[in-house]
Amino acid sequence: MSGTFDEKDIEKITKKRVEWEQGTLKKSLERFGVDEPPDRFYTPMDIQDFDFMEKVGFPGTYPYTAGIYACHVPGAGPVTGGGNIGATGKGMVRAGRYSGYGMAEDTRDFYKKEIQRGRTVGPNLAFDLPTQIGIDSDDPRALGEVGKTGVAFDSLQDFEIIYEPYEGKSGLDKIASNWTTNAQAFVIIAAYIALAQKKGIDPKTLRGTPQNDILKEYVARGTYIYPPKESLRIFRDILTYCTEHTPNLNICSIAAYHMREGGATREQALAFHFANAITYLQIGVDAGMNVDDFVGRFSFNTLSGDMEIMKEIAARRAARRMWAKIVRDRFGSQNPRSQIYREAGGFVVGCVSSTKQRALNNLTRTVIGGVAGAFCGYIPSVEPPYDEALGLGWSTEAQQLSEDAARIIQYEAKLTDVMDPLAGSYYIEALTDQIEKEAWDIINKIDEMGGSLKAIENGYMQSAVAKSAYEKQRRLETGEDIIVGVNAFTDESELDVKVQQMVPYPYDAGKQASAEENQIKKLQQLRKNRDNKAVEAALSRLKEIARDENANLMEATIEAVKTYATIGEICGALREVFGEYSAYGAL
Amino acid sequence: MSSKRPIKVLIAKPGLDGHDRGAKVITMGLREAGMEVIYTGLRQTPEMIAKAALEEQPDVVALSCLSGAHRSLFPRVVDELRKRDMSNVLVIGGGIIPDEDAPDLQARGIKAVFGPGTSIKEIAEYIRENV
């Protein structure tokens, strides 16, 4: 046996366990009048094959269980104002809190204020739904949706406006941006490159992360445009173009987040997002690239989870191990830097744990999540702010409390003073192995189907998520799962603690209300002022390139973006070539 | 209404919002509660929903929206149903809908709004009592 524990010790412990169960434990159960113990106790028996070097290793070395880097960045921690998911430390550039609303002007003004409050990081841009599905603000389907879930982007002009505050020390060559863009990521990336070129900034210096994870859209988020196969062609083009021309830009942020929030179990979310990552990885390999040339630019989005934080901690340890195995063992990577699971982590208990009822309890919940985050190697973040479930934005008061809670976890409780402090715990190591195994089982199942593309085309992933969501709901309704203040502890004697002073949402409600009308006016003006012949020619060229399976459409997209062709026109041109995905309820 | 025929519910996602965990869970839950349920899938315009209703003849049209566009979308669905002579269909809604918006929606024909934390049982009971 290659494990850490001596065979004889295990024998002794096993024997002792039986004695304990039949003696001490039995007596306690009888005293308390129950048949089954309400809890478990873990011992070396549960991890007999445990080998520290094989299962854990040192942080920053294969298999990275304890952490993808050897240590935290010194000085990294929750910083002043402006908010961060995770944090900025020296040497790491991150984008800040997810933000954006209304028109580009409104979002620009919001960032201006944030910069005054001390924000030093780049925009983490939320786009509205019309933008996300590649239609213009005056498209009939956009009615009522413009500027609501994020900023309205119709053309390069909107990026020019949003990025106005980012000059000099905060220039595009200094900051990192985040864009929640998927189906139309090729347009957003092209716009950012075009913007940089216009400002005389070398695209090679650009940093940021387009989400660019189209596969999960079909499973859990819904902002797809084209059918899956055609979308992967676009992914390939972004991958090969950006690897060459914008080597400091991340290619994608492959998410377990949305599928988890959509109801997937922990193991399903892990497995499904890795299956998607494998698909994307394979695309790069099939395009003739060496895995070490590009996979270091893949990143992950593991936001979300649930209140069972020990399992969440174990899942993240398992994820790091699994990605290392996938990249090194399955795809033959030779560069350790390619094998690390770079993630935007946090929201460890999930937005899904936030309740509308007795909303202040969400602060309690997310503090627990922040502690868990510290225990699994994150800079603690206490997210989302407690008023998450109340509407469509967070008050600055709630944000302040979240920031302070993260600071307390790090600076008072000092929970980041030890890396992977739960390493070696019989429970956590057993749990990590178990979750890893169950996730591999699901990945193998998807492999047998032919990969995640097939698993999406045949509806397997979508229905698995829906079933898990339904099973969760049933457990809530039978009371098997408890949510305090929602299905338990809800009688009249309970107090609904409310906050006395509510600081308003940071977004201007008036501006948000008038955004649609004003954006449409602006758009119509743009169409008048630009060179429409150039637009037509550029769109024509783009279609031609799109029709050639082997051609890369990024250059043509950048050219089209520069003529101020709108996102609706560009995506519309490709709709003509690729068709549109339609998901009529397989349910 | 015949007590033999099951209650028919059309669950729809108006607008561009892509979050349909709730819609799917309620679809499955109401089916388990003995109702006949059709789920339209994402990206339905008010016209598409009304056309589907015309075809399916449901007793209830249940709308789900989490993007903040409920105030313009939900009443438009009610209007499209009225245009097609389906004013007697019970229209209800759910999703992320601030409490302040519920009275206005109710005044415009969305008879009940079910927020986060609602159980399938509650919705099923409401439907049974109000169709």
Image (spheres, rainbow, N blue to C red):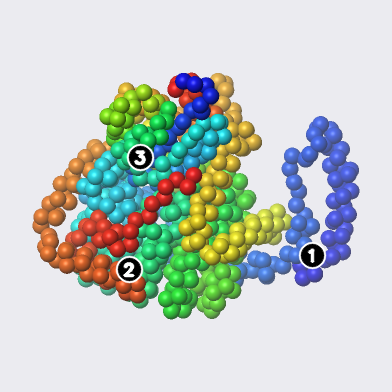
Pointers 2 and 3 within a single chain: no
2 and 3 marks in contact (CB < 8 Å): no
Q: Name the front one of labels 2 and 3.
A: 3
* Residue A106 versus residue A297 in the image, above or below: above
Q: Which residue is at the front of the view, A42 or A467?
A: A467
Q: What residue type is labelled 1?
A: Phe
For disc 1, the chain is: A
Count neighbours of disc 2 (C-alpha within 10 A) and say few if under 14, some if 14 to 19, many if 20 or more. many
Q: Which amino acid does label 2 sit on?
A: Leu
Count neighbours of disc 3 (C-alpha within 10 A) and say few if under 14, some if 14 to 19, many if 20 or more. many
Residue A167 x, y percent position in the rendering:
24, 62
Q: Which residue is at the front of the view, A237 or A161?
A: A237
Task: Estimate the spatial distance between the alpha carbons at disc 1 and disc 3, rounded to whole Å.
Answer: 59 Å
Q: Earlier in the sequence, mark 2 or mark 1?
A: 1
Q: Name the residue under label 3.
A: B14
* Local SS, label 1: loop
Q: Mark 2 points at which residue?
A: A206
Q: Mark 1 points at which residue?
A: A5
For disc 2, the chain is: A
Q: In the rendered image, which quarter contains the N terminus of chain A?
A: bottom right
Q: Please tell me which residue is depicted at 56% across the width and 69% down the height of the picture.
A: A326
Q: Which residue is at the front of the view, A242 or A64?
A: A242
* Residue B4 versus residue A266 in the image, above or below: above
